[in-house]
Amino acid sequence: MLPAMTSHPIDLDTLRHGARLAGFAWSDAELEEIRPQVEIALRLLRALEAIPVGDTGPTTHYRTV
Amino acid sequence: MADLFWASMTELARLIATKAVSPVEVVRVHLDRIAAHDKDLRSYITICADGALAAARQAEAALMAGRPLGPLHGVPYGLKDLYDTAGIATTGGSKILADRVPSTDATVTRRLAEAGAILLGKLNMVEFAYGPEGLNPHYGHARNPWDGATHRLTGGSSSGSGAAVAAGLAPGALGSDTGGSIRIPASLCGITGLKPTYGRVSRAGVLPLAWSMDHVGPMTRTAADAALMLTAMAGYDAADASSSVLPVPDYRVALTGDVKGLRVGLLRGFFLDAATPEVRSGVEAAARALAAAGAVVDEVSLAQITNAAPAVLAIIGSEALAYHADTLRARAADYDPEVARRLKVAAFITGRHYVHAQQVRGLIRADVDAALARRDVLLAPTTPMPAPALDERQVTLGDGPSPVRPALIRFTQPFNLSGHPVCSLPCGFTAGGLPVGMQIVGRPFDEATVLRAADAFQRLTHFHARRPVLG
């Protein structure tokens, strides 16, 4: 888990780390530009993680018969 | 013939088959309409005038020679510019693909041609279909034809399809729908848009946004035309692994006009409570109209539906970034900055998020299935508000203020997760003259009932027959 998943707001080091893990070498300026949207997304993802799913199997595709 | 550009596809097919009009005349009328209005509407990226006229002449010759005719013989239509078309640029609304000319047609492009349809051109869209507003900085922002004074959003991502069909620049079109991209422009532009069941229509040869969420379908002015197009397009395709082998009925046969005994669930809570008063009253009046025609209407809520937004973010973001990662590394500056930003944000979604989102997806699907276990269709608003102005950033909904973007996709995205078939159609107009859209949701692969209900509603009302006045 990225530190950003549990803390808010996200700092530049965490952004750099996350981008590198995903395989992108974005400049600090580029990371600063997306920081507000990343923070919003991480809030939503924290909400996602909090949804209890029990033993529901992941549905990657709808039934296509 | 006056106002031929307002004729439905069904009516055009009949007029052509009975030799009341020539396909050449029909195509010319639409090309003239495009020439007169598309400078303002920006609904087309590529206009295929020569190809369309040549195809129309061939269609006329076939007609005169008495050769067998397809159900769409000589009827023109437009394609969102992410469907591959052999020899015609397919840009995905991006300058990155501005010179991309496919060598083959998408499966549905070919099927529509085999049915006799004639391609008028390739329609504007949000770059790579990643956004619901309908904006495109490369090819111009498509304009909603319902307001001549204020530039209003068409909705997206199938922005050009919505504007062109609503304004009579094409009698029908194809869109694609990953979070609402057929239904949102259908709602904001006052037309009929069908997102079929996941797997019902092949996506082979269609540029993807998110493979497990992408649906393709027709955008027309009537449910009957959607049935006509869907019948020609749907069915198994070995080139699309998600394609269903279930047989395809003739959807036109289902259009009986009869809704007696049809069990309709009106979706309260998350849907109606969050809609603006004019949208809410439009959908409630539609439910009353269906009940007066014999449908059995009750109210229902979906408990899991509030979980849709984070799941959609994780799934669409992950899948879209997987598709774009290499191009984003090489040509980030050539993307629409908004689209590039959305893709970059997706880099912070983890595999664990993605799988959790797919589990949530299972819950939402089960929720919708349960609501449909004792009902034939569900009824809900398509968008919580009518078309916002271009510069509007925030809207006030029934449950408070919201930025425009999440508001637009709020009611549509759950059914991309669930995969159920949904038709959006106009169910009213605001006091300011803007269309209001509603969704009819059906059981998996039961597009016939969805279209029957939509067509019956259009026989009871005239919202779908109202036309914008262009400058």
Image (tube, coloured by chain):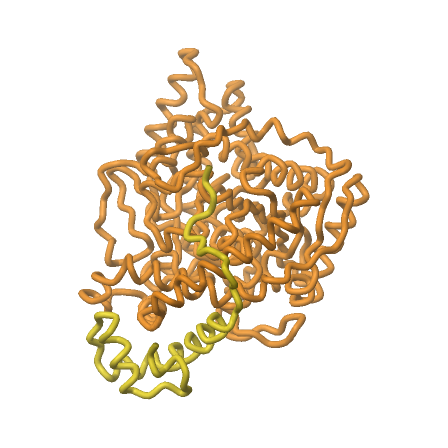
Q: Is residue A12 left or right of residue B466?
A: left
Q: Is residue B201 left or right of residue B395?
A: left
Above/below status of B241 relative to A27: above
Above/below status of B317 relative to A64: below
**Residue situated in front as seen by the camera: B278 or B362:** B362
Above/below status of B264 relative to B118: below
**Residue B238 picture location, percent across and down:** 33, 33
Q: Quadrant of residue B281?
A: bottom right
**Residue situated in front as seen by the camera: B337 or A64:** A64
Q: Quadrant of residue B316?
A: bottom left
Q: Is residue B451 left or right of residue B49?
A: right
- What tint does the image give chain B? orange
Which image quarter is the N terminus of chain B in?
A: top right
- What tint does the image give chain A? yellow
Residue B152 visible at all:
no
Residue B342 visible at all:
yes
**Residue B419 picture location, percent across and down:** 50, 48
**Residue B27 picture location, percent across and down:** 43, 33
Query: Which residue is located at x 55 percent, y 63 percent?
Result: B410
Q: Quadrant of residue B345?
A: bottom left
**Residue positioned most to the front:** A55
Query: Which residue is located at x 32 percent, y 81 percent?
Result: A33
**Residue B295 picture location, percent across and down:** 77, 41
Query: Which residue is located at x 40 percent, y 86 percent?
Result: A7
